[in-house]
Amino acid sequence: MLRAAMAPRDQNIKKVVLAYSGGLDTSVILTWLKETYGCEVIAFCADVGQAEELAGVPEKAKRTGASTCIIKDLREEFVKDFCFPMLRANALYEGEYMLGTSIARPVIAKALMDVAKEHGADAISHGATGKGNDQVRFELTAMAMDPSIKVIAPWREWTLKSRTDCIDYATKHGIPVTATKEKPYSTDRNLFHVSYEGGILEDPWREPDESIFLTTTNPGAAPDQPRYVNVRYEDGDPVAVDGDRLSPAQLLARLNELGGEHGVGRADIVENRFVGMKSRGVYETPGGTILHKAHRAVESITMDREVTRLRDSLIPEYAAMVYRGFWFAPERLVLQAMIDEAQKGVTGEARIKLYKGGAYVVGRRSENSLYDESFATFERDEVYNQADATGFIRLNALRLRIRALRSKKA
């Protein structure tokens, strides 16, 4: 027999806002919260571009016991206020992961807390497990917004230990779910990316089945003709694709479509989770990959060398902050301010060639360009005295020469 909980409930919790998707876990959690805490449960669903049908979610939540279900369209906010700042930083976790799941969590948690405040809830709840990063990301955001909020994390409290246990619990309680006990992997999707992990992917030697990919064409089967796309930037943010000015969410969706058609943006990574273990993830980030390449291209002709070098040295720190859930922490905000200051003047256009899984920079131009052909040319010029390089080299070599002389004497 499946017990409901491991510990007595908090008598002071009368109303909980649950981050709800309508899937197996959150449907079970909704019933479990009511059974364990005897509280009212408000279901909250965030639309971050997961491309799932949300029309029937409120009815399903109410059938499962929610007093109401609130759906918020966060797509524009997600891209403008979360993805774009991260892209301005060129953030890559451990050099490869574009942080698609990581960056969605703070926008969802922020909206969850807004609903909790609006409805006078005592607590929030989520379906993140005790082994992953998402529990940290959700709860750090919640505590940064309201340190008095109570957080209920069922996977850290109840006696259910597996997906099979959840299905058995749902069957026993008459919870309407369509899940089966066989699922080869788990998926998380938003407008920025799709991730796949667990199940058959836990073997890091096994190549992902082609059938898992949702948004990108197999590069080998992608069009034989390349597609060129121009991305316009203003002060570090993309504003237009091929001359069409688009909202942030529309722009990312357009590039997802173009990149996906040409197989761009696949990644297969073993990463280090914040909680300590290594985890294998497979990702699709077509639009984000194009934006990362295009942004670097515009920066290359508009940003000062030393500013770029300093900013680049901080990318691993920034990416770790996002990955670990410290989006609303003061260190991320301070670092973002520096990054955004460096983005002033990063205005121009990049030309990207999409071909068979690759996104290649083939052109860049800007009205703010620091690239001057008269200085850079290998042809005859009147602006650069090559003899000046002798003193430059000798001064930079001075410490090396002194070290060599010491070694020679020894």
Image (cartoon, rainbow, N blue to C red):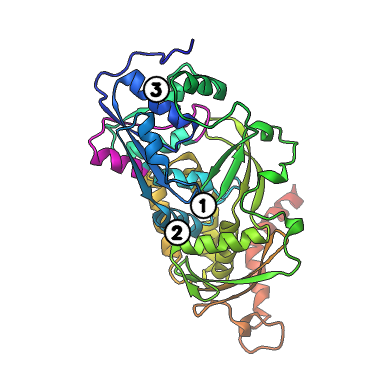
Residue at image mark 2:
339
Residue sitting farthest toward the top: 1
Q: Which mark is residue 314?
A: 1
Type of residue at label 3? Trp
Type of residue at label 1? Leu
Write down the region rendered in magenta: 110-133
> Gap in Å between the C-alphas at discs 2 and 1?
9 Å
Magenta stretch contains residue 257? no
Q: Residues within 10 Å of mark 1 (few under 14, many from 20)?
A: some
Residue at image mark 3:
32
Kindly state the secondary structure of the residue where label 3 is placed.
helix
> Is label 3 or label 1 in front?
3
Residue at left offset 54%, top offset 68%: 299
* Occupied quadrant, residue 19: top left
- Whether residue 292 is visible to the viewer of this picture, yes or no, is no
Q: 189 or 287, which is in the foreground?
A: 189
Q: Residues within 10 Å of mark 2 (few under 14, many from 20)?
A: many
Label located before the other in sequence (3 or 2)? 3
Residue 171's x, y, as percent? Answer: 49, 21
Residue 195's x, y, as percent? Answer: 58, 44
Q: 328 or 215, which is in the foreground?
A: 215
Type of residue at label 2? Ile
Kindly state the secondary structure of the residue where label 1 is placed.
helix
Magenta stretch contains residue 131? yes
Kindly state the secondary structure of the residue where label 2 is placed.
helix
Residue at left offset 47%, top offset 66%: 236
